[in-house]
Amino acid sequence: METQGINQVNQVLAQIRSIRQQSDISKAPGIAEPSALSSPEQLKNPNQVEFSTLIRDSLDSVNALQKDSMKMKEAFAKEDPNISLAQVMVSMQKADVSFKAVTEVRNKFVDAYREVMRMSV
């Protein structure tokens, strides 16, 4: 019984590690490498995603992860046989990591805005 619990914990940790690797921002679609944005012609590329669209999609994704996590927690609490503790923990970690990332991005934007406002014209 104890070995099974350790195996489940190890599985959850492996899933969390794989999620971290998959969530590498440099692999995100629509985000160009800095070297790819070297000329004005490349900035006008219609294949690139607009910044506002990227932010909106990111926030929608975080919101969806939060909602999925909540639904899984409720289903597990209702003893749904299709939902395991490992699934619930992974969904909660996904939601937590994505929310923390959005919070950090927001903090960086606020810091950048304050820096720009302090600049003299």
Image (cartoon, rainbow, N blue to C red):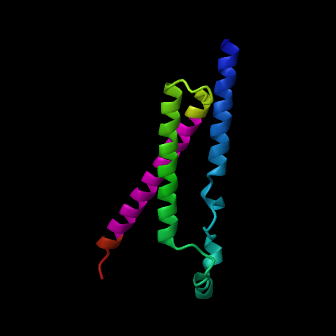
Predominant SS of the magenta segment: helix
Q: Position of residue 30 (x, y in %)?
A: 61, 68
- Count of numbered tags: 0
* Residue found farthest to the bottom: 41
Q: Is residue 54 above or below residue 43?
A: above
Task: Locate residue 111: give its quadrant.
Answer: bottom left
Residue at point 48%, 45% (across, down)? 66
Residue at point 70%, 15% (across, down)? 3
In depth, the one of 114 and 7 nearer the eye is: 7
Is 8 on the left-hand or right-hand side of 114? right
Q: Position of residue 121 (x, y in %)?
A: 30, 83
Q: Magenta segment: does it hold 101?
A: yes
Is 73 on the left-hand or right-hand side of 28? left
Is 11 on the left-hand or right-hand side of 102? right
Can you say which quadrant of the picture contains the N terminus? Answer: top right
Q: Please provide the residue range marked out in magenta.
A: 89-115
Q: Position of residue 79 (x, y in %)?
A: 54, 23
Q: Is residue 42 above or below residue 79?
A: below
Residue at point 61%, 72% (across, down)? 34
* Residue found farthest to the top: 1
Q: Position of residue 75 (x, y in %)?
A: 52, 31
Q: Magenta segment: does it hold 87?
A: no
Residue at point 69%, 18% (across, down)? 4
